[in-house]
Amino acid sequence: MLNRSRTYLSVACCGLITVACILALNSTVLSPSLLTNRPTPTHKQLYDVISPSTYRYILNQPELCERKIPPFLILMIPVTLEDTEARTAIRRTWGQENLIPHVNILRLFVIGQPTQSNPALQEHLERESKEYGDIIQMDFVDTYQNLTIKTMMIMHWIATYCQCAWYAMKIDADIFLNVPYLVDYLHAQGKSSRQDYITGSVIKNGHPHRNSLNKWYLSEDLYPDTLYPPYLSGAAYVFSSDLARKISLASRFVRPIPLEDVYVGLCLHFLGVSPVYSSRFLGLVNRFEIRKLRYERCSFAKRIIVNGFKPHDLLYIWHDFQNSHFTC
C-alpha cells in the first residue's frame, strides 16, 4: 500500500517510467485510432496514487441518487475540512435544495483528510453529514498537490453511485453559480449533450511551466511534451455523467500529474473527446467567467459562473440576485 501522504512529485521520482502509457479499453469508449495503437497501462505504482482502491471512505452518501426521478444535475464541490463557512454559504445560495421547481439538483462536498489531524473539526463534519447528507470524505491527504486524486475520486463516485444523473458539475467553492441559466443552457443542448459531452472555459495551446517556483510547475520527467491538449479550467466544468466512468477508466492509462484540470484534459484526449466551448460561451460575454468581476445584477444574469467569491460575499449578493429574473 502506498504511503497516502506521498505527493505526485515524490512518486514520480521513483523513475519507473517517463511517458504516459495507454491501452485500449473497449470500442465503445475509445476511437479506432487508439484501438490500433494498442498501448500499455501506466505502471501500477503510479496508478495506485489515483486509484480509488488505494483509499477508503470515511463518510459517504451511497444512496443519494436512488430516487424515482434521476438527478438532472449533481454538483460535486471539492472543499477541505476547514471550509465550514464555504459549505454553509453554498447550502444557503446556489447549492440550496429545490432551487428550481421540478428540476432535481443534488450537491455533494468532496473532502479528504487534513495534513494534521483535527478531531474537533472532524466531529463537526460528521455532524454536518448527519444533518445535511451531502458529505463525501476519503482518507487521502487533502493538499493542492493531491487535487488530481480528489478529482478522480469525484469521477469514481459518480460512476459508482450516480450513473443515472443526466449531468455532473465539478465546481469550486469560491464560485458564484447561476443555476437557472445553467439548467436552461443544458436543456437547450438537447440529446447531443447526453454522451461524451463536457463544457466550460476551454484552454487551448496551454504549455507546462518549467520554473520550479511557479505554482503550476511541471517537470519534463513528469510531462515531457511542450504543449497540453485542450483542457477546461478546473474552476468549474459540466459533463454528461457517462464521462465519469470513461475518465475513470482512462486514468488507468494516463500517467498522473498534479495539475487536475490538465490531467482531465489528458484523459479526454486519450478518449478522443473534445471539450466544448460553444458559440454561446464566445463573444463579449464569457458565460464561464474565470476571473473575478465586480457584482452587477444584470451582468451576472448572463453568466453561468464567476469566481473569486468569499462565503460572506456570496451570501451578500445572493438575495439581490434573485431579482434578476424580473429586472434583467
Image (tube, helix red, strand yellow):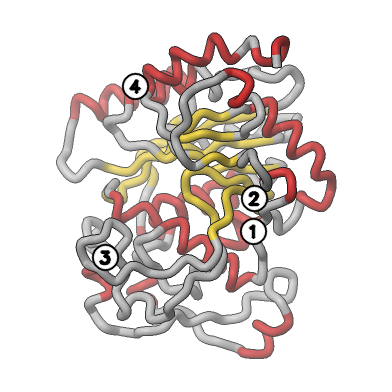
Q: Are marks 2 and 1 in contact (CB under 8 Å)?
A: yes
Disc with the residue nearer the chain's start (2 vs 1): 2
In this rendered view, identify the residue nearer to me: 31 or 181.
Answer: 181
Please identify the quadrant where the C terminus is shown. top right
- Across and down, in percent, residue 100 comes to 70, 20
- Secondary-structure class at tag 4: helix
Disc with the residue nearer the chain's start (1 vs 4): 4
- Secondary-structure class at tag 3: loop
The quadrant holding residue 242 is: bottom right
Q: Amino acid at mark 1?
A: Pro
Disc with the residue nearer the chain's start (3 vs 4): 3
Q: Is 154 left or right of 11, judged from the image as shown?
A: right
Disc 3 target residue: 2
- Across and down, in percent, residue 48 comes to 37, 67
Name the residue located 74 percent from the left edge and 39 percent from the top edge: 186
At label 4, counting other C-alpha atoms closer than 10 Å, the crowd grade (few under 14, some 14-19, many 20 or more) is few
Disc 4 target residue: 85
Q: Is 295 left or right of 48, judged from the image as shown?
A: right
The answer for how far apart the CA atoms under marks 1 and 3 are is 33 Å
For the question of whether residue 271 can be seen, the reply is yes
Outermost residue, front direction?
284
Q: Amino acid at mark 2?
A: Thr
- Mark nearest the camera among 1 and 3 is 1
Disc 1 target residue: 275
- Mark nearest the camera among 1 and 4 is 1
Q: Amino acid at mark 3?
A: Leu
Disc 2 target residue: 199
Q: Are marks 4 and 2 in contact (CB under 8 Å)?
A: no
